Image (cartoon, grey):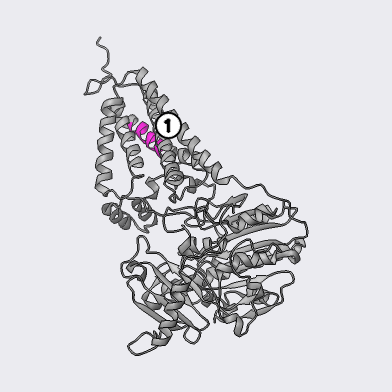
Amino acid sequence: MAAPDTSDDRGERRPSLTSHARQVILFAAGATLLVSGVHLLTAWHAEMVRHQLTWAPRELWWMAPIGYGIQLMGIAAALVLLGVVLHRSRSRRFVVFVLGTYSALALLLLIPRLHPLAYAVLALGIGIQAARSLATTRPSRRRVAGAVTVVVYVLGMTTWMWGTAVRQTGMVSLQAPADRPSVLLIIWDTVRAANLSAYGYGRPTTPFLEQLAADGVLYESAFATAPWTLPSHASMFTGMPGSELSASWLTPLNEVFPTLAQVFHRLGWSTAGFVANHAYAQAGTGIERGFRRYEDFKRSLMQTLLTTTVLQTELAKQTAWAGTWSQRLRTLLAFQLRVMPIKLSDSKPASEVTDGFLRWSDTQDGPWFAFLNYFDAHLPYRSPERFRVFDERPGNEHLYDGAIAYLDSELQRLVTELRERGTLDNTIVVVTSDHGEQFGEHGLVDHGNSLYSQVLHVPLFILAPGLNPARISAPVSLRDLGATLLDLAGIGDSLPGTSLARIVDGPDSRAAVLLAEVQRGINRDPAEPVMRGDMASVITDSLHYIRNGDGVEELFRWRSDPGETGDLVAPDRADGLLRTMRAHLDSATRPASGIRRAGS
């Protein structure tokens, strides 16, 4: 009797199901290590050599292989199942082609700005070539290929972990006196002052802040230095204007100027950051310098999967967000196969930021400096159901208000816990925001695209031992926040700026000229003002002057016209005011001299 035929139509011997499954798993494991290793090397090169933002968790060295492994092992499982149903698929060539194509696509997506069809064609070509080359390779050569794959991953893991260790290297610190105050800096990301009931808003969005304001100082006219996160935080932490800092859309804050956390750490304060903005406040942006503990990305299955390139494509995002199968089909047909510059992440609600801080602070014996960044009031304006109680408004402003109310409740939980622990009386508490938001004013939405008051006027509240309660109407800049906190902590002038704790309403306090700037954005609507070029503005006690990138000027009386609807710039109008404001802007944007730099 003739033996049963165990070869396929190409003459390749068809393995048993067990052997087939083992081969599929081995190829998937090898592909996982190879893709992860190259991903790590690419991220390390971008961050440490090219000094670019990568939006990658510090735990990328283990998240990437798990994330890619789940995807590739899922494909492997499908191939094994296919081998059961269709025996002709038990071919090493077919396995290498499928896994090779997917792996090639994952790696090609690390290269920005290719056409979607180019990604697909190149991935298919690499998959075909891999099937021809590897499927028929002798076992000894496959072992060599496996060894090279392991070396690539180990090299990628080592370089990435080394880069992470370099970033976390801190300065030798002193021991702060035990009686010095702790400092709690709370930043409500994307919260504008106009939507807080503590600032006269008609909806009860911040009842606890209103109550707390009776015991501290509320600055009614605080302005951010930038209309988006990274340069605003960088300015707060260094005391420098944005134009003198490296922080931009694709570039982190460099080490030229010392940060607030570095000063506190050097003088003996325990330092920690707990952030929910994974786009522009995570470790790697530069604002984490000086923090001995920094909690940003969640260690979750979702975040692990989102470390991979394929799940960061517009195609994957829109498919996941599609509400119906017809929408998913349209998304697939659109084939938006490119990775967005700013990566998606597993969102962290306010309660988790608060919990992380409370756990850490409960273990501290001496004074500490903690930075909390809450992201709930940023698009898509998330909050628990019980806070979504406001009547609907265009642009989802009602959801925005609900998110602010949620943040206010978390502030109450924080303050209550510190009071019960007996530490509040010796703690400086600051509540502010990095920038505001637009809901149709000037035909704009979101932020980072203009310099109108909607994105610059932010809340600022300080509760500190020995600081008398007050409401300050004089305009102040968040650029001075670092100097203020050091002054209140009894440290002195380790950062440039003027302590806001010393401002008293009166004619002399209104002489300050506040500067705000924004660079031309990325992936923005061409109709937005910032797309015409870099912008700058100055704010005095009553006037707000904006110079657009194309030279167009705008001038508003921001106190009497908070919505900035009446532009004073017109023929034969406000010429004297314009000359004065132009001079203010030219003076404010002149490079500073004699500023202390890191290590000086």
Relative image position of residue 363 (x, y in whole percent) = 72, 51
Confirm whether the magenta stretch covers residue 77. Answer: yes
Q: Is disc 1 placed on a helix, strand or loop?
A: helix
Is residue 351 visible in the rendered structure shown here? no
Vertical relation: 249 (above or below) 551:
above
**Left or right of 530 on screen, residue 351:** right
In the picture, the quarter occupied by the N terminus is: top left
Relative image position of residue 538 (x, y in whole percent) = 47, 75
Relative image position of residue 370 (x, y in whole percent) = 64, 58
**Left or right of 336 on screen, residue 565:** right
**Left or right of 434 on screen, residue 315:** left
Q: Main secondary structure of the magenta part?
A: helix
Vertical relation: 266 (above or below) 595:
above
The quarter holding residue 469 reads bottom right
Vertical relation: 562 (above or below) 364:
below
In the picture, the quarter occupied by the C terminus is: bottom right
Is residue 97 visible in the rendered structure shown here? yes
Number of numbered discs: 1
What span is in magenta? 71-82
Q: Residue furthest left?
A: 9
Q: Residues within 10 Å of mark 1 (few under 14, many from 20)?
A: many
Q: Residue furthest top?
A: 1
Confirm whether the magenta stretch covers residue 562. Answer: no
Question: What residue is shown with label 1?
Answer: 152
The quarter holding residue 183 reads bottom right
Q: Nearer the viewer, residue 529 or 79?
A: 529
Q: Amino acid at mark 1?
A: Val
Q: Nearer the viewer, residue 539 or 21?
A: 539
The quarter holding residue 490 reads bottom right
Q: Residue furthest bottom?
A: 572
**Left or right of 329 on screen, residue 407:** right
Relative image position of residue 63 (x, y in whole percent) = 49, 41
